[in-house]
Image (cartoon, rainbow, N blue to C red):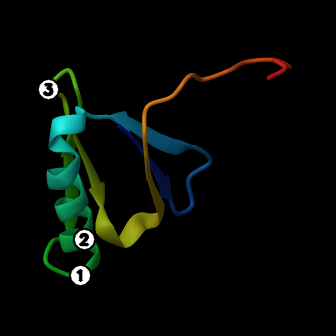
Amino acid sequence: MDIRIGITHGGRELSVEIDDDSADDAAAALEGALGGDATVLWLTDRSGRRVGVPVDKLAFLELGPTGDRRIGFAAD
């Protein structure tokens, strides 16, 4: 599963790829962070690296399945 995180006053977005098994845990962490329970949103990616984003800097969150990332003008 891919998680895209928009950060306020940032020119780029953060993309974290997590295991599909931990998708529910990630969703719970996102809801807890947005609900005011935490000041930092912590996520662990597939390689075990932890990523922290201050909750007050979150612009948007997008959860979705890991898909093929196409480059160029591919026709379907």
Residue 13 lies, with reference to residue 18, above or below; the image says: below
Amino acid at pointer 2? Glu
Q: Judge whether 47 appears above or below 60 on screen.
A: above
Please identify the quarter of the rendering in which residue 68 is found: top right
SS at mark 1 in the image: loop
Q: Is residue 19 above or below residue 72?
A: below
Residue 48 disc label? 3
- Horizontal and vertical percent for residue 76? 79, 23
Residue 28 locus on image (x, y percent): 18, 63
**What is the spatial separation of the Cα atoms under label 3 and label 2, in whole angstroms?**
21 Å
Above or below, 58 relative to 68: below
Residue placed furthest toward the bottom:
36
- Give SS at disc 3: loop
Label 2 to label 1, Cα distance in Å?
A: 6 Å
Q: Which mark is residue 12?
A: none
Image spot of residue 33 (x, y percent): 23, 70
Q: Mark 1 = which residue?
A: 35
Q: Which residue is mark 2?
A: 31
Residue lying farthest to the front in this orientation: 76
64 or 46: which is nearer to us?
64
Residue 55 vs residue 72: left or right? Answer: left
Residue plotted at (45% across, 42% down)? 14
Which percent across, then down, holds residue 34?
Answer: 29, 75
- On screen, residue 70 versus residue 54, left or right, reads right
Q: Secondary structure at mark 2?
A: helix
Left/right placement of residue 58 relative to residue 72 reads left
Tell which circle, 3 or 2, labels the residue nearer the N-terminal end: 2
- From mark 1 to mark 3, how far is it between C-alphas? 25 Å
Mark 1 or mark 3, which has the lower sequence index?
Answer: 1
The three-letter amino acid code for the residue at tag 1 is Gly
Badge 3: how crowded within 10 Å, few (<14), some, or many (20+)? few
